[in-house]
Amino acid sequence: MRKIIASLDIGNHTIKLVVGEIVRGKLNILACVDVPARGIKKGFIVNPETAMLALEDVFKKGEEQIGLPIKKVIVSVPSNGIECFLSEGYTSITNEEKIVTSNDIIRSMQAAVYNKIMDNRELVTILPTKFLLNDSIVSASPLSMHAEKLNVKAVVVTVPKKNVTPIVKCLEKLGVEVVDVTIGALGDYYEFKTNKNSEEVGAVINIGASKTTVSIFNKGIITSSEVIDMGGDNIDYDLGYVYKINRKDALFIKETIALADKNIAQANEAVIVEDKNGDRIKINQFSASEIVMSRLEEILNLAKKQINLLTKKQISYIIITGGVTETAEFKNIVDYIFKNAIIGEVKEIGARHNKYATAVGLIKYYDSRLRLRNRDFSIFSIEEQEELSGIHKKVNISENSILGKLFGYFFDN
C-alpha cells in the first residue's frame, strides 16, 4: 500500500491543504494548494457557514491538482490554552510468544491517558519519551521485543475542546473524515527535525498572519507552547495607518518593496499608490522598511522573552518559520536579535514557501506515529491508488502530434 497522507492547516489569511506520499522515508508532494480564509479569526472558526465555503474551495483546488476526491485529512488546531503533562501507562503482553505487537504499544499509550483528560479538553497527541519492558529494559521502539509487561512514559498534550469541535464539525458536513487532530507546532518541528536537534532542547517559532507561536522541545518532545497575538497582519496595519492606504496596498508594499532590514534599504527605490483620499503618494523603500523592521523587532523580542519564560534550560537551537519569514532580508533581523537562530525553510518541491511549513511537517509527524504503531495508512483506497498511478488508463496520442511522432520514431526504429 502506498502511504499517502493529507494535512490541513487553517490560518487567519489562508487555508493550506497538502497531500504527500512517503516513499523510502522521503516526502513527495502530490498536491499543495491554499485559498483565502473566510469565517476564520486567528485559526478559530467564527462563522461556520462562511468557513465551510472556504474549506470547500481548498478541497476543490486540491482535488483538481491530484485528480481524486480528498476525503481524509489530519488537521492542525489552535494551540491556545495548550497543556502538556507527564503520564505513564502499561499493558500486559498476552500473546503466547510474549512478543510486543503494535496493538500492545497502542494499549499502553491508551492506558497513559485513561481517565486523565478533563471533559472540557481534547487530546491532540501522546508523545512517548521511553518504553520499559518488564519494568527495567528501556527502549525507544519496543516492537517485536520479548516481554511480559510493557510500560510507557509519555508527554500528553491537550487543548480546550472549543479549539477542535467547530473545525471537525465543518469538515464532517463536507464529507471529510478527520483521522487525527494535532497542533501546528508539531508540524513545524517535524518539518525541520534532524538527528542533532532530536537530542537537544530548543525552540520553534512560527510567525503567521495573526499570531506567533513559540514552542519548546526537549529531545523531540514538546514541553510547552505559548501564542503571541501578533503577526504579519500587524505590519499591514502599521503600513496602512502611517500612509493612510488600504490593506491591499499595504500588503503590496510589504511584499514588493519593503525589507526586514532598513539598514540596507534604498531611499531612491519607491512605488506610487493611492491613499484613502484618492491622492497619489510616493512611498520609498527606506521609510517602508523602517516600519516593517520596527514591528518585526517587536515580534522577535517578544518571542525571545517568551522562550525565557517557557524554559530555564539551555537552548541549543532556535528555528523560526512561518509565512512572515519570507519577507526580504528577514535573516538580517534574526541575526540582530538572536545571533544563533536559523530560518527553517521548506525545501520540498511543490511546497517551497514557509507558509506551508506546518502542513508539510504534519504529514511527517503523522508518518512517525504510523511507524511507531507499525500501521499502514493511505487516504486513498487501492483502486484509487491505481487510478492515481495511471494503471488501466489509456492515453490517446495523435500521430500528428510531436509526442506521437517521437513515439513513432522510437518504436519504428
Image (cartoon, rainbow, N blue to C red):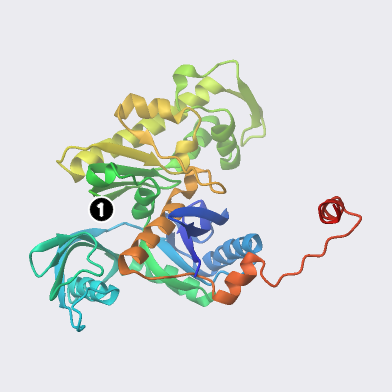
At 83% from the left and 51% from the top, the residue drawn is: 406
Looking at the image, which residue sits at the far front?
413
Nearest the eye: 248 or 383: 383
Q: Secondary structure at mark 1?
A: strand
Q: Position of residue 100 (x, y in %)?
A: 22, 73
Q: Picture quarter containing residue 364?
A: bottom left
Q: Can residue 244 be seen by looking at this rendering?
A: no
What amino acid is labelled 1 in the image? Ile
Looking at the image, which residue sits at the far left?
136
Nearest the eye: 314 or 150: 150
Indicate left or right for 211 with 224 as reference: right
**How many labels sit on residues?**
1
Indicate left or right for 103 with 250 as reference: left
Q: Can residue 207 be seen by looking at this rendering?
A: yes
Looking at the image, which residue sits at the far right?
400
Query: How many other residues sit within 10 Å of disc 1, few (<14), some (14-19) or many (≥20)?
Result: many
Indicate left or right for 96 with 259 as reference: left
Q: Is residue 236 above or below residue 15?
A: above
Q: Picture quarter containing residue 308?
A: top left
Q: Position of residue 230 (x, y in %)?
A: 38, 43
Q: Is residue 308 above or below residue 42?
A: above
Nearest the eye: 96 or 168: 96
At 21% from the left and 69% from the top, the residue drawn is: 145
Q: Position of residue 104 (x, y in %)?
A: 23, 75
At 64% from the left and 59% from the top, the residue drawn is: 65
Q: Position of residue 321 (x, y in %)?
A: 41, 42
Q: Which residue bears the numbered disc 1?
A: 222
At 30% from the left and 38% from the top, the residue drawn is: 318
